[in-house]
Amino acid sequence: MKSIIKNILIIALVLIAVLLMFGGDNQNLSLGSKNKTVAISELVKLINNGEVIELEIKEDNVVAIDKNDNKSIAKINANESVFELLKYYGVNAEKIANTKIVFKEDINWMNIIWYAMLALIPLYLLFMVMNIFGKQNKQGPGQMFTFNQSGIRQFSPHKNKITFKNVAGMKEEKEELLEIVDFLKNSKKFTDLGAKIPKGVLLMGSPGTGKTLLARAIAGESNVPFFHISGSEFVEMFVGVGASRVRSAFAVAKKAAPAILFIDEIDAIGRERGSGIGGGQDEREQTLNQILVEMDGFDNNTNVIVVAATNRPDVLDSALLRPGRFDRRIILHLPDISEREEILKLHLANKKINPNVNVRKIAERTPGFSGADLENLANEATLLAAKNNQKEVLEEDLLKSIEKVMLGPERKSHIIQPREKEITAYHESGHALVAAKLKNADPIQKISIISRGQAAGYTLQLPTEDKIFSTRLEILDELATLMGGYSAEEVVFKDISTGSANDLKVASEKARAFIMKFGMSKLGPISLAEDESIFLGKSLTNKHNFSEELAAKIDTEMENLLNAAHDTAKNIITSSKKVLENIAKALLEKETLEKEEFYQLLEEN
């Protein structure tokens, strides 16, 4: 845009200079030293005296030239006859006959240049706009004819190189992928034994577990060309474009074989066929069909390995997952405590960290965090330290950042009425007290009535060690803990507030899973969980896989579970009301209670 404005200004200045050059002679012919402007009567007098030897007649003036080449200019009306005017003023006809008369056409350069400007400037602006769009499309106006090309990009291994050393944890996953890299580097030792190169590797895992990072590490480890593209880039509004782009992408990879083709978020095009509204003519399904053919069609001798990533493996078409296409399926789990410690050390390596920071303690406080969450945690702690003008990141910064990542930033400026603050204090104290009294509940790490995100307060519970499973008793105690805030409001204020809405929602979901998914209720070992529906998919019209009578039993069992959890929490609150009041008063005074302060209060009471 700056270059356009600059060019327009240059053109304007050039045109102004031209106007001054050509227009000056027309606007004022009397600028020369021998030129003078006179009245028509004086011009007549000069002619009658015989001083004029030549007359130049133009549209709006008459120029009289004497023997000394002096010019006298008289202005006249452009529509008036010169001879009639001279005759009217009494010019001697004999004098006129002896005077040379020259007719000259007066060219108005001002008008010509002005009209030229009006014509050329819009054309210039149109050209500049087309040039801008051409640059944005990289290939100029011809890009509109190449929209069926895939736009696949080759990863440069020398730019921000990442190897498996830069990926903490995931030992088994890296071993699987190293085998692929080794096959591409030294394929002979595998083929000599009769082994075939795997066609595809599917990386599956929750968001943030490092699927794309692993793909970049493959590119860094292998010395073969690495191409990457997103699944959404194949799909276009024009029918057949997706399939054409798939052919284009595979053609580029095959030319560089042996090579790796990485498709990120493959679920954008790999969803189960028959789940859309277009049937076999659906553009997305046509694109998927082309991928299936390219991966395992008649031409299956190409050394191109397709690596794909998704966090929704449950919606992928079964044809994609069969042997011959994605032969390897690598599941990326959330990191355990040791892996979290490795990941934290990796992300803290390039930051100024206080030597006394206990990284293991931070790892213990972050169960359920993905690799991306831990990277964000390290960055938030560094930002907090810089905000406080510290020279290094302290352990306290990391602990505060855990809550920020989990719940959002503190809202200390948020004004809470004293009554609402008191309700929040007793509500959170109820959660903490019930959890402390129950044997199978996770220990309390922190209680706070400082608003974070959408929560007016929070009680932070974290397990002492990583857990893969939850037992029946643990879930029952968790339900009772969720009812702790509701019960505390009931006992203390003889009323309840809307602050328990989220607790009740979570408790209801857990109770339904307890009955229908885990088979832990009185209904016995039965799974009634339904598959997740696909939007506008085949499960849109699916009915429940159980009868109305069983549905009524599920509702009754769910009601009994929640009422039992409520009774447990209420009994604990009622029997330990004095302890509850002491915890709430401490919260109102300090606003935050750490683990040590909370359990010390319990011991004192």
Image: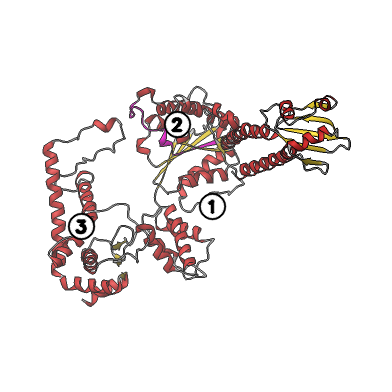
Whole-Å distance between the Cαs marked 3 and 2? Answer: 45 Å
The image quadrant of residue 45 is top right
Instruction: Determine which residue is flagged by label 3.
Output: 498
Q: Nearer the viewer, residue 199 or 568?
A: 568
Between disc 1 and disc 3, the foreground one is 3
The residue under label 2 is which amino acid type? Answer: Val
Packing grade of label 2 (10 A; few <14, some 14-19, many >=20) is many
Residue 184 screen position, x and y as percent: 57, 37
Q: In the displayed structure, would residue 472 be above or below residue 21?
A: below
The image quadrant of residue 182 is top right
Instruction: Determine which residue is flagged by label 2.
Output: 235
Q: Of callouts 1 and 2, which one flags the residue occurring earlier in the amino acid sequence? A: 1
Identify the residue shown where x is 48% and y is 43%.
176
The residue under label 3 is which amino acid type? Answer: Thr
Inspect the magenta stretch and tell me whether residue 519 lies in it.
Answer: no
Q: In the displayed structure, would residue 107 be above or below residue 330?
A: above
Q: What range of the chain is rendered magenta?
A: 260-277
The image quadrant of residue 447 is bottom left
Instruction: Determine which residue is flagged by label 1.
Output: 165
Q: In the displayed structure, would residue 545 be above or below residue 173?
A: above
The residue under label 1 is which amino acid type? Answer: Lys
